[in-house]
Amino acid sequence: MINFILNLLDKLPYRSKFGLGLTSELKIIYYQKIGERKHRCLCGGKVRTRGIYPDGWETTCSRCEMLYDED
C-alpha cells in the first residue's frame, strides 16, 4: 500500500530547491527520523552502506535504490 501512495506522490509536479520530488523528500525525512536506527527505507527496503574506506562509500536502499549519502 505504501508503494502505491509513493507512486501517486511521485506523479505530482512538486520539486524542491534541490530538484527532489515529494517522494524523495519524504524518504529522506523518514530515514533521518526513524529509518536510520532500523536500517529501513520508507518503501520497505533495507538501507545498506557499501564501499571501502580510502575509495569512498555510499548509503542506498536495496529496493528503490534511493541514494541517502555518499563520499
Image (cartoon, helix red, strand yellow):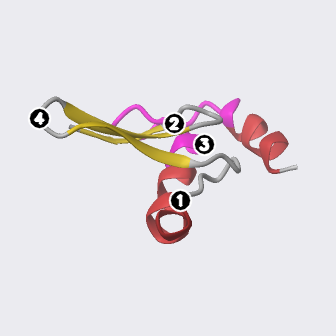
Residue at the image point whose x is 54% and y is 63% from the top: 35
Q: CA distance from mark 2 to mark 1?
A: 13 Å
Q: Horizontal and vertical percent for residue 57?
A: 27, 37
Q: Residues within 10 Å of mark 4 (few under 14, many from 20)?
A: few
The label shown at residue 54 is: 4
**Secondary structure type for disc 3:** helix
Q: Residues within 10 Å of mark 2 (few under 14, many from 20)?
A: some
**Residue under numbered circle 2:** 66
Q: Looking at the picture, which amino acid does disc 4 mark?
A: Pro
Dividing the picture into quadrants, the one containing residue 52 is: top left
Q: Earlier in the sequence, mark 4 or mark 3?
A: 3
Q: Looking at the picture, which amino acid does disc 2 mark?
A: Met
Q: Horizontal and vertical percent for residue 19?
A: 40, 31
Q: Earlier in the sequence, mark 1 or mark 3?
A: 3
**Secondary structure type for disc 4:** loop
Q: CA distance from mark 2 to mark 3?
A: 10 Å
Question: Is 71 on the left or on the right of 12, as rendered?
Answer: left
Q: Earlier in the sequence, mark 2 or mark 3?
A: 3
User: Which of labels 4 and 3 is toward the front?
Assistant: 4
Q: Residues within 10 Å of mark 3 (few under 14, many from 20)?
A: many
Foreground: 19 or 68? 68
**Secondary structure type for disc 2:** loop
User: Which of labels 4 and 2 is toward the front?
Assistant: 4
Residue at the image point whose x is 71% and y is 40% from the top: 9
- Give the magenta range: 10-25
Q: Is any part of residue 41 visible from this angle?
A: yes
Q: CA distance from mark 4 to mark 2?
A: 23 Å
**Residue under numbered circle 3:** 23
Asked whether 70 falls inside the magenta stretch, the response is: no
Badge 2 vs badge 1, beta-carbon distance below 8 Å: no
Asked whether 20 falls inside the magenta stretch, the response is: yes
